[in-house]
């Protein structure tokens, strides 16, 4: 070894030995965390491939990019560990000269960008196609890409992961992390705010919205926290130790696992909605509302034999609104009809975007809507049924015991 190499080895040894146990433990903890999340990722990917035959091509491309890059990160981490602790065991120079840490940034930015594009598309749809939102998110994502890509050549040219090289590349690291963090916070905030504004007062709708909010928190909050930890450890401790290695190595896995969890949650949500929706199979204990509609026509007759008022009542046949549906024939006046409630929440095949009609359904409840109470059959209270009213002096009842004044005719 040349005197220059010896001096560099001593410098690297002093840097690692300053917090020897902490620095070495960071690499092993980061490797173990990445291996654990890699197993979770492949299980999620297996579930996604099982149920995603009809999924959109856009979603499949996003999943392909994120999973491929995350698998590449695992390969890079394995190679880096062999380089540090197998091939160069006992030497400290590789801790300061390895270029794998720089190339790993390209995989990290590819994974985070693809995931941010996916959720930005959801935020765009939920925000009623806001172009301003797309512009802001697009600028933040581009700045993040420029910071990550610009960091790689500067790091390689410096040929040392020392304090001097960190100072040269600090601006690009901050651009990468700060812009990525801003994009994550903005996307998450817009999606959550849009879902909260979509509450309609329907119990089933609000319950599903709360489930969607929980999914957003579970899938988007962890990668946001990881990139925040990365920014803090790099800005405050990069000149003393390797604590920033852990968030950098596991960042891509958190983005990928969050994306796959969000996609896989659609199937469980749809199954739950199908059980509660009127479009699903009717329950045997579901309440049945029997609507009886009767029409009375009063006409005047002149001549002898009429009553003192000169009027007689001639009761006509009760009007049956749907004769074909009556099993007793067209002459029957009794119509058992099963009235099902409309599901106020509609989900796309590829997203959880709420329909505009679902947000306005409560405001259109007029005198034509009557709420039926739970009668012990397991039906949800407040279920809405619509009654048939005619533009004449008729009376409409919900039971056979409804009393009306005048002469009643039943057939």
Image (cartoon, rainbow, N blue to C red):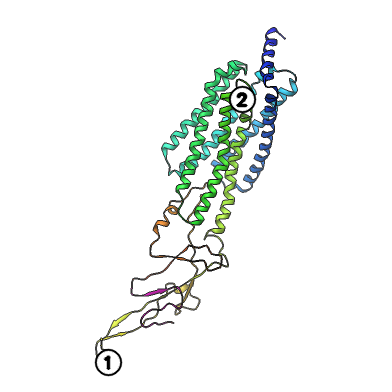
Image height of 132 relative to 158, above or below: below
- Depth check, front residue: 364 or 304: 364
What x and y, as percent, mark residue 225? 57, 35
Task: Locate the C terminus and report the quarter of the image it occupies.
Answer: bottom left
Which residue lies at the image location 67% right of the left edge and 34% below the top edge?
Answer: 33
Among the two numbered marks 1 and 2 on one chain, the one whose residue lies closer to the N terminus: 2
| Left or right of residue 136, residue 270 in this image | right
Q: Which residue is mark 2?
A: 103
Q: Is residue 396 left or right of residue 8?
A: left
The reply to whether the magenta stretch includes residue 194 is: no
Q: Secondary structure at mark 2?
A: helix
Q: Which residue is painted at 66% across and 44% down in the image?
A: 46
Magenta segment, which residues? 392-409
The residue carrying mark 1 is 305
Residue 273, image x, y percentages? 55, 55
Q: Position of residue 203 (x, y in %)?
A: 50, 56
| Quadrant hosting residue 56 | top right
Residue situated furthest left in the rendering: 303
């Amino acid at each position: 070894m040349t005197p220059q190499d010896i001096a560099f080895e001593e410098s690297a040894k002093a840097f690692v030995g300053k917090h020897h146990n902490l620095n070495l433990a960071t690499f092993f903890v980061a490797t173990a965390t990445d291996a654990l999340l890699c197993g979770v990722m492949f299980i999620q990917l297996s579930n996604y491939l099982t149920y995603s035959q009809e999924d959109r091509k856009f979603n499949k491309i996003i999943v392909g990019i994120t999973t491929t890059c995350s698998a590449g990160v695992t390969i890079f981490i394995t190679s880096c560990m062999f380089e540090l602790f197998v091939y160069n065991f006992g030497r400290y120079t590789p801790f300061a000269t390895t270029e794998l840490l720089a190339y790993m940034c390209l995989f990290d930015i590819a994974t985070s960008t693809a995931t941010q594009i996916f959720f930005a598309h959801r935020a765009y749809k939920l925000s009623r196609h806001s172009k301003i939102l797309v512009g802001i998110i697009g600028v933040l994502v581009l700045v993040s890409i420029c910071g990550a890509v610009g960091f790689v050549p500067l790091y390689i040219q410096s040929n040392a992961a020392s304090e001097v090289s960190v100072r040269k590349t600090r601006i690009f690291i901050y651009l990468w992390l700060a812009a990525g963090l801003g994009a994550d916070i903005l996307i998450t905030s817009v999606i959550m705010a849009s879902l909260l504004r979509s509450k309609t007062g329907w119990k089933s709708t609000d319950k599903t919205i709360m489930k969607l909010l929980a999914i957003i928190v579970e899938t988007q909050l962890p990668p946001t926290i990881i990139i925040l930890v990365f920014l803090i450890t790099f800005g405050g401790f990069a000149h003393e130790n390797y604590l920033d290695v852990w968030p950098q190595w596991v960042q891509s896995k958190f983005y990928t696992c969050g994306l796959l969890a969000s996609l896989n949650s659609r199937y469980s949500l749809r199954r739950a909605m199908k059980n509660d929706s009127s479009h699903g199979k009717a329950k045997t204990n579901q309440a049945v509302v029997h609507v009886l509609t009767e029409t009375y026509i009063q006409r005047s007759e002149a001549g002898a034999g009429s009553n003192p008022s000169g009027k007689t009542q001639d009761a006509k046949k009760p009007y049956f609104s749907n004769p074909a549906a009556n099993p007793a024939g067209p002459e029957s006046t009794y119509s058992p009809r099963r009235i099902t409630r409309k599901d106020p929440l509609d989900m796309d095949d590829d997203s959880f975007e709420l329909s505009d009609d679902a947000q306005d359904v409560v405001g259109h409840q007029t005198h034509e809507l009557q709420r039926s109470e739970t009668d012990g059959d397991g039906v949800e209270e407040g279920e809405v049924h619509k009654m048939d009213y005619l533009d004449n002096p008729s009376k409409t009842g919900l039971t056979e015991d409804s009393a009306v004044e005048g002469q009643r005719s039943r057939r």
